[in-house]
Amino acid sequence: MLQLSSLSDIRQHCEQVRCQGLRIGFVPTMGALHEGHLSLLRAAKAQNDVVVCSVFVNPTQFNNAEDYNLYPRLIVEDAEMLAQVGCDVLFAPNAAEMYAQAARLTFDFGILERVMEGAHRPGHFNGVATVVSKLFHLVRPHQAFFGQKDLQQFAIVQQLVQDLSFDLELVCFPIIREEDGLAMSSRNRRLTPEQRQVAPKLYEALQLLSEQAKHVPIEEAKAAAVTFLTQFPELRLEYLEVVDAATLQPIAHVQEVPRAAVCLAAFLGEVRLIDNVLLGQ
Ligand SMILES: Nc1ncnc2c1ncn2[C@@H]1O[C@H](COP(=O)(O)OP(=O)(O)OP(=O)(O)O)[C@@H](O)[C@H]1O
Ligand SMILES: CC(C)(CO)[C@@H](O)C(=O)[O-]
Ligand code: BAL
């Protein structure tokens, strides 16, 4: 596997690959890789000739300095895992070069960013859109793979691709979970054994709410899920929303929209986790 860190090297390499008529599949990540990332990489490999994975803990999307400083960084282990799944190129830039020219661009995603992650992490999606735009320009992939775990991020990136006319296909893959239901996340590594035991209750709450929302108004179903979570004082719920999966706007009845999603963010100590489930009709 080729490992590149400079912007000119990745741009040049990807340009050569494209000139040979080969298809590039791209998986952007922040590293500390797990099965969730690997599922995206395997899909990228199956559908493309060359797979590029970026590992970059992007400073501009963090609204909390401690979260940025304590984000797990495991580049040696990441490189081993990437080689094992047949990734062709690991791009791991450093922040100084990535942001040498422009600190942060300004985007406006309208209502899409005024809810949930956008509302609770000021500037977050501006940072995501900045780095994803830069990465798309450097790699110019035919396909880019994202996880449903970051449901709102996927909607924002779809909007970005449309607004800036990026010539690529976006692919969203389902959430990979631990056996007890906890959504895999790099931040799970920061949980204490006690917090790790309680963390799967978040998924239980999502399941409870999605089941109840089929029969009763959402406010009632939400209240039941919140009551369930209050049994676990280690968990601090930040938001719990039932939204239209297309617009991410809150709804009152799941029957209002073709597809609803139940989304949450919660703290266990200082570790902030997100999760969601999609409701079919
Ligand atoms: N459990 C998962 N299943 C499927 N895809 C995932 C999962 N976790 C993350 N991803 C996807 O992997 C890509 C890179 O995400 P990232 O590197 O931020 O990992 P992460 O585990 O989500 O980290 P964290 O939750 O700590 O932010 C994103 O598109 C994300 O949605
Ligand atoms: C898309 C991304 C790699 C941009 O930094 C990040 O937000 C992530 O890992 O989901
Ligand atoms: N997976 C989303 C990246 C973040 O939490 O900043």
Image (cartoon, rainbow, N blue to C red):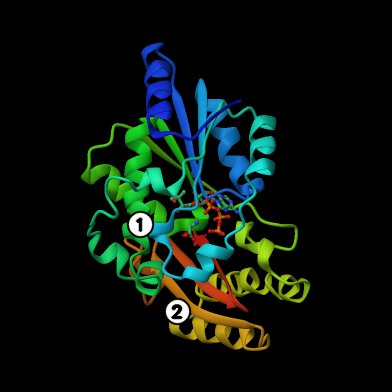
- Residue 182 in view: no
Disc 2: residue Cβ within 8 A of ligand 1's nearest atom: no
Name the foreground residue: 58 vs 232. Answer: 58
**For residue 191, side relative to residue 281 (left or right):** right
Up-down relation of residue 107 to residue 24 (above or below): below
Name the foreground residue: 58 vs 35. Answer: 58
Disc 1: residue Cβ within 8 A of ligand 2's nearest atom: yes
Amino acid type of the residue that numbered disc 1 sits on in the rendered structure: Gly
Indicate the secondary structure of the residue bearing disc 1.
Answer: helix
Residue 127 got which mark?
1
Q: Residue at x 37, y 54 (%)?
A: 128
Q: Residue at x 71, y 57 (%)?
A: 178
Amino acid type of the residue that numbered disc 2 sits on in the rendered structure: Ile
Disc 1 from disc 2: Cα separation: 32 Å
Q: Could you say where residue 40 lies in the image, as x and y percent from the top left?
A: 56, 40
The crowd level at tag 2 (other Cα within 10 Å; few <14, some 14-19, many 20+) is many
Quadrant into which the N terminus falls? top right
- Residue 127 in view: yes
Name the foreground residue: 249 vs 13. Answer: 13
Q: Residue at x 50, y 74 (%)?
A: 213
According to the picture, the residue beneath numbered tag 2 turns out to be: 218
